[in-house]
Structures are given as C-alpha cells and as structure tokens.
Amino acid sequence: MNRRIAIRNMALILGSAAVLPSCFNDKKGKPVVELKHLEIDADQENLVTNLAETILPRTSTPGAKELGINLFILKMIDDCTGKEQQDAFKAGLKEFDEAAEKKYGKSFNQLTQQERTAFVVDLEKQAKERGAKEEAAVKADKNHKPEEPAKLDTFYGMVKGYTVFGYTTSQYFMTKQVVYELVPGRYNAMFPVKKKATA
C-alpha cells in the first residue's frame, strides 16, 4: 500500500474517533455558564434567559439578557442555595416548560415575546388566586394545613427574585440609575430650618 494513502486513512480514522463521541451527545448541549452543583443543559439555560428577559425586557434601558442577569441567576442558585432548593429549581423548571408546552403546544423558548409575557402574567394571576384561597381557608379553619406551593411557582419565584436582585445590584443600575453615595453622605449646610428651636 502507498505510504501516503495509509497515513491519510489513519488520519481520517483518528479524526473520526475524536469527533464521534460528540455525535452521540444529546442535541441540547452544555450551558454557557460553568456550574458546580446545578446540572442543566443549554435549552434549560435558554429558558432561564428568556424568562428573565420576559420579566425585565429591554426598553429604553438594557434588559436582563444584555446585563447578563440570566448568568447571575444560575450562579446564585448554584453557589448560594442548598441541594433541596436546587432540586426544587430543576423540578420547577421542567414543570414550567411542560406548562408552556401544554398551553401553546410548543416550548417556552419557542414562544413569541407576546406569548411569553401572556404566559407569565397568567401564571402570576393563578398563583395569586391560589394564595387568596389558602388565606381564606386558613381564616375559616385555624387547623387548616396549607398546601405546599407548586414547584412551578417556586421556580418562577426564584427566577423573578434573582432577576430583581441582579438588576438592582448591577453595575448599570448602581452607576446609571442610582448614584451611590458613601455613608454618611455629603454635608448640606444650606438645609432650610422652618422653626427656630429654643430652650
């Protein structure tokens, strides 16, 4: 056999062996952000990104995606919550996407921005109604044992809370929206006094 052809064939075999394992992986891929404890795929990361952008959309100010709040949410849940909360987050994430699929026939990531907003508004409305029913049941019966919140509500509450926290502590917010002053702040000698205090 020609030595050049043999080397070429050997290179093709080795190259195929290197590429082959990636062909067997699922199509969902890995998330962009590196996480130590939370195991999610790229689709789930996109769902969190799209949900955060729905909660805090881009207007005349940057949205959640532009500020990187989606990555902040995942890092906070990965680094600052326990396994129980991380498991609740993952279970809720799955339920959230299944609820969108059930309502619209497609995943949350495939919805238009208007559909995502309508879905989230409806979700909040349902959660408020459930909360009001529970409150009424507790008032009617002091021994009433409240039901555990749906995993979907837990997931949504975590994403919404971290979106607001991420935005209000972001560099953009602290430098462009709120001008931070070190405590105790500046001395204002021109403050008007209405009434003279006498001893």
Image (cartoon, helix red, strand yellow):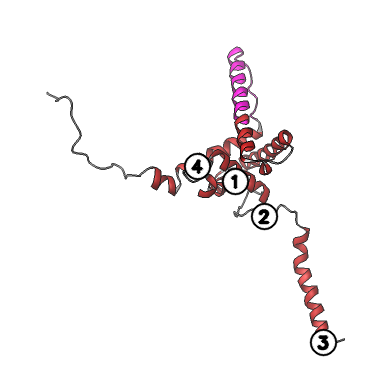
Residues drawn in magenta: 123-149
Task: Pinpoint residue 111: horizontal percent, then vertical percent.
Answer: 67, 41
Q: CA distance from mark 2 to mark 4?
A: 30 Å
The residue sitting at 22% across, 41% down in the picture is 187
Mark count: 4
Quarter of the figure with residue 158: top right
Residue 129 drawn in magenta = yes
Q: Amino acid at mark 2?
A: Lys
Front position among marks 1 and 2: 1
User: Residue at 53% across / 45% down in the picture?
Assistant: 64
The residue pinned by badge 4 equals: 59
Instruction: Identify the residue position indicated by label 3 in the image.
Output: 3
Q: Identity of the amino acid at label 3?
A: Arg
Observer-nearest of 37 and 169: 169
- Distance in Å between CA atoms under marks 1 and 4: 16 Å
Q: Amino acid at mark 4?
A: Thr
Mark 2–mark 3 Cα distance, whole angstroms, equals: 40 Å
Task: Work out whether 8 lies above or below 111.
Answer: below
Where does label 2 land, which residue? 30
Residue that mark 1 sits on = 49
